[in-house]
Image: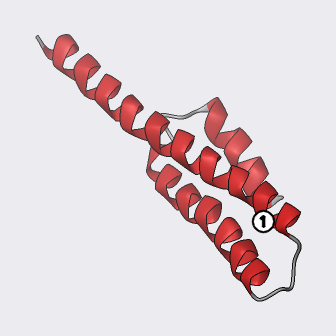
Amino acid sequence: MAWQVAFLIMAREPVRYRPLMPVTWIEKLLYPGAVWMLYFKGRVPIDSARIATFDLVWLALFVIAWVNKGIVTRRRARTSSE
């Protein structure tokens, strides 16, 4: 739950919290990894593993947004300095 609050804080000031964003990737990778590991050991049902996989979708979207924002930021820096 604490990470969900952190995501909301970062969404309000993404430029300020940009260096923290790669840390969120770890959070989005560890949860599905743990659930899938438990599934393969027979400790959770497949439905739990499927639901946890949605975090991988969020991970991909976070990475795309982070990379895209970096490209936009560099372009703006270049045009403002000219």
Query: What is the quadrant of the N terminus in the image?
Result: bottom right
Along the horizontal axis of the image, is 58 left or right of 79? right
- The percent coordinates of residue 70 (x first, y second) are 34, 34
Residue 74 shown left or right of residue 35 in the figure: left
| Residue 26 percent coordinates (x, y) | 56, 65
Q: Amino acid at mark 1?
A: Ala
47 or 57, which is in the foreground? 47
Considering every residue shown, the one lying at the far bottom of the view is 41
44 is higher (above) or lower (below) than 62: below
The answer to whether residue 61 is above or below residue 45 is: above
Residue 58 in picture, x, y percent from top left = 63, 45
Indicate the colouring scheme. Answer: secondary structure
User: Which residue is at a point 17% across and 19% down the rendered structure image?
Assistant: 78
Q: Residue sitting at 71 percent across and 74 percent down?
A: 36
Whether residue 28 is visible = yes
Quarter holding residue 49: bottom right
Is label 1 in a helix, a strand or a loop?
A: helix
Measured as percent of width and height from the top left, residue 66 is found at: 44, 39
Image quarter in which the C terminus is found: top left
Mark 1 Cα shell of 10 Å, populated few (<14), some (14-19), many (≥20): many
Residue 28 against residue 80 in the figure, above or below: below
Q: Quadrant of residue 79?
A: top left
Camera-side residue of 6 and 67: 67
Residue displayed at 73% across by 40% down = 8
Taking the image as shown, residue 47 lies to the left or right of residue 18, namely right
According to the image, label 1 marks what residue? Answer: 49
Query: Can you see residue 17?
Result: no
In the displayed structure, would residue 4 be above or below residue 30?
Answer: above
